[in-house]
Amino acid sequence: MPHPDSWLCIRPEGLYCQPGDFYIDPVRAVPRAVITHAHSDHARPGHDAVLATRETLALMDVRMGPGQAGARQQALAPGETLRVGDVDVRLAPAGHVLGSAQVVMEFEASRAVVSGDYKRAADPTCAPFEPVACDVFVTEATFGLPVFTHPPASGEAAKILASLALFPERTHVVGAYSLGKSQRVIALLRGLGWDKPIYLHGALMPMCEVYQSMGVELGDLRPATVAKKAELAGQIVLAPPSAIADRWARRLTDPVTALASGWMRVRQRARAGGIELPLVISDHADWPELLRTCDDVGAPEVWVTHGNEEALIHALTQRGYRGRALRLIGYDDAGEVAA
Ligand SMILES: [Zn+2]
Ligand SMILES: [Zn+2]
């Protein structure tokens, strides 16, 4: 049986499956791409043929505009297997954002799984990560350091409601990335019993509408306009992290600024960003989840795409796995507050 390193390789465009003649999350436009999820560092415009989940294709269309997200699109349903060239391809849920999937490839009884971004924590807005046994597991390592342990997300979201109880007149502005994080924060607040309208910066509404159209319950969502700032006193407003840093948030009434990100585990980051209420809510696996996932998939060999490769590979080697750093470039959520 051929080792995956004989049929999966790194090219300037990204990770390439040779017997299937396709790329996974390529950073440049290619003839054939398989896309794990719709975040901008994984899903780029201009590919000819795109294979992804139905949800990812819908999110890509909204983000990029009609015709940009692949000249030819093909949706692969959960559990469905497609023969591409000489490779059987299947998409397994990754638990990262709506539609996110791992790419399961089988070539001559040799199986490799590319995780894309993933997490193991519960998230009502997407299907949970499914461990798939394989010969090589290709993982991310955005939070690949022992210091990164994410607390339960509902406890973090509860801090917003606790702050509102203390400061009932202040507008609570929560920075949350437009795809995935904002919908998760909304779902967490709904789970905690917050049934009032939640107000959204204009950049967040289109993604939330896709979620709702795919059956994810987000409750009463309304546009947040600074013109109506009196109405926003004592309310929760979600905005992209960039809007928290600029004047948009400061024009609201005496705002409390919060930010939902795995990076909020690093206190200096919150302080530097002027964030009063840091919320450690991440859509990526933390350190224990990364190690547990490698155990769950049981692959003797783990390749690490991006993030803190060295630390994870060192820990995996100590646990008896062979580790390899792919050092893929162009996957930049490690450096941003979005994660
Ligand atoms: Zn992502
Ligand atoms: Zn990523």
Image (tube, helix red, strand yellow):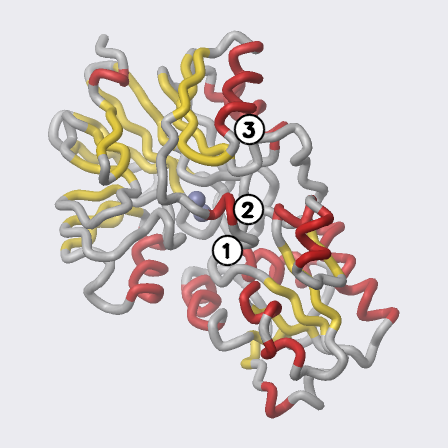
Pointer 2 or 1: first along the chain: 1
Answer left or right for 240 relative to 20: right
Task: Name the quadrant of the N terminus.
Answer: top left
Q: Which residue is mark 3?
A: 290
Residue occupying the far right of the picture: 166
Label 2 secondary element: loop
Per the model, the C-alpha gap separating discs 2 and 1 is 8 Å
Residue 78 percent across, percent down from the top left: 35, 41
- Residue drawn at 44 percent across, 12 percent down: 322
Q: Which mark is residue 180?
A: 1
Q: Which mark is residue 283?
A: 2
Answer left or right for 171 relative to 185: right
Pointer 2 or 3: first along the chain: 2
Indicate yes or no: mark 1 CB to ligand 1 under 8 Å.
yes
The correct choice, above or below, for 41 with respect to 102 in the image is: below
Indicate yes or no: mark 2 CB to ligand 1 under 8 Å.
yes
